[in-house]
């Protein structure tokens, strides 16, 4: 029976489906919750999952609770911002309220706290709101901290994360230490000897004193994008700032891709939107390298090729070298390599290179730039036409032929 279920999973889950949340063996492929021996399909992408004695998942407008074997215990049409499970109870952040439901889906607790961003609970409720982090006990607020978070986990300690920033607190709300990690944090695991912080691409174990114990790289056999709305909002903000710095660069194509990404985001295609933004960043990286040539150049006539580079993506670019070796196939150039000084963000440098075309035609060559932070390649097209000197020579040659023609040959024409 297990083999049959596994085959069913493979057939239903296409490789292009995105995963926006997972918990242990339970993985959510867009709108599908997949366990070891079951699949539950919802109407919209699943954005959050938590597991204890039951499983709870939420989309933008629905919450479903299942037992560990996949049997649906209850489902509700509700727009929840956050959820958490403790034993058989489920806590939801619904607008500005915290609500707790029992195993049958009956609401047993309700408290207005401010717009809920994240939460977790046991005998106490720790909730991240737009007004800070709050701890409740029996509907009474026992402490508050001016901390913003999109993830809360409680055990003997309290762990909160705001995108890539991690904070460990005591149960009475005192900060023990803070750390900044390399990517968005999507979960936290408490162990006897420390806490494991899971980011997109790594597992970092800290001792309770804040010392790094172990760093492990994580790979996935699916396309993983935890907290897609938060990640995408940050990406859009980042790209808009970068585009403001890109004055003088050809970024029409980049802007068009960003517009497509915004459309996908509105349509809840978070994975598609993310892929478009990554493509936009790659194109922006390429457009930092600028190569300008005249529209037409002439065979054997010298022209000037302008090579420029604008640093938009990095605080500092060093050891920047532009390689023009590929031009030598069709042009004689006075330099094969152009070296530039260090560039701070927003700075632009340029050099002119003299080139002489060897042949007539449309030629495509690659110009490569390499630095301490990036390596980009850009295709450049150059149209070479016959020079005026050569046309004049050809005309004189034909005129001479006509002058030397015999009378008999003239009659035959």
Image: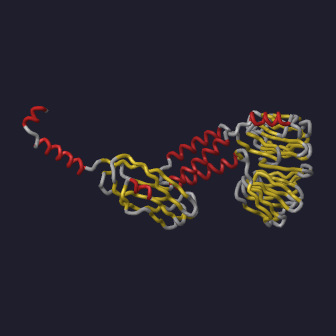
* Residue 162 shows in the view: no
Nearer to the camera, 209 or 413: 413
Image position, residue 146 (x, y; %): 77, 58
* Left-right relation of 112 to 266: right
Image position, residue 20 (x, y; %): 73, 44
Quadrant into which the N terminus falls: top right
- Residue drawn at x 40%, y 63% is 335
How many numbered marks are there?
0
* Left-right relation of 391 to 197: left
Q: In which quarter of the image is residue 216?
A: bottom right
- Residue drawn at x 81%, y 63% is 206
Quadrant into which the C terminus falls: top left
Image position, residue 190 (x, y; %): 86, 57
Image position, residue 209 (x, y; %): 83, 67
The figure's colour scheme reads secondary structure
The relative height of residue 400 versus residue 246 in the rendered view (above or below) is above
* Residue 234 shows in the view: yes
* Left-right relation of 236 to 158: left
């Amino acid at each position: 029976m297990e083999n049959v279920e596994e085959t069913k999973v493979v057939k239903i889950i296409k490789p292009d489906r995105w995963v926006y949340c997972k918990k242990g063996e339970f993985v959510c492929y867009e709108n599908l919750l997949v366990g070891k021996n079951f699949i539950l399909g919802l109407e919209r992408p699943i954005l959050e999952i938590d597991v204890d004695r039951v499983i709870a998942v939420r989309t933008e407008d629905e919450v479903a609770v299942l037992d560990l074997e996949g049997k649906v215990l209850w489902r509700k049409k509700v727009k929840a911002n956050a959820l958490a499970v403790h034993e058989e109870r489920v806590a939801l952040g619904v607008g500005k309220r915290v609500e707790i439901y029992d195993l049958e889906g009956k609401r047993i607790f309700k408290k207005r706290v401010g717009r809920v961003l994240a939460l977790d609970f046991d005998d106490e409720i720790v909730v991240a709101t737009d007004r800070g982090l709050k701890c409740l006990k029996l509907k009474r607020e026992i402490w508050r901290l001016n901390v913003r978070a999109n993830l809360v986990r409680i055990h003997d300690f309290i762990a909160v994360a705001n995108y890539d920033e991690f904070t460990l607190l005591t149960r009475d709300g005192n900060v023990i230490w803070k750390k900044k990690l390399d990517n968005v944090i999507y979960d936290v695991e408490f162990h006897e000897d420390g806490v494991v912080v899971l980011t997109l691409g790594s597992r970092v174990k800290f001792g309770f004193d804040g010392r790094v114990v172990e760093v492990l790289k994580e790979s996935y056999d699916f396309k993983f994008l935890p907290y897609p709305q938060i990640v995408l909002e940050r990406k859009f903000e980042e790209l808009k700032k970068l585009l403001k710095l890109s004055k003088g660069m050809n970024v029409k194509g980049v802007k068009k891709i960003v517009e497509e990404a915004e459309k996908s985001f509105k349509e809840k295609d978070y994975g598609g939107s993310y892929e478009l933004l990554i493509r936009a960043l790659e194109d922006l990286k390429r457009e930092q390298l600028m190569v300008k040539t005249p529209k037409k150049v002439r065979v054997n006539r010298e022209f000037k090729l302008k090579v420029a580079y604008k640093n938009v993506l990095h605080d500092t670019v060093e050891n920047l070298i532009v390689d023009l070796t590929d031009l030598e196939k069709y042009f004689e150039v006075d330099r094969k390599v152009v070296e530039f000084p260090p560039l701070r963000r927003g700075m632009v440098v340029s050099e002119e290179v003299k080139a002489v075309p060897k042949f007539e035609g449309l030629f495509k060559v690659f110009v490569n730039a390499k630095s301490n932070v990036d390596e980009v390649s850009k295709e450049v097209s150059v149209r070479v036409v016959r020079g005026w000197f050569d046309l004049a020579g050809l005309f004189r040659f034909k005129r001479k032929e006509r002058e030397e023609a015999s009378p008999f040959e003239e009659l035959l024409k």
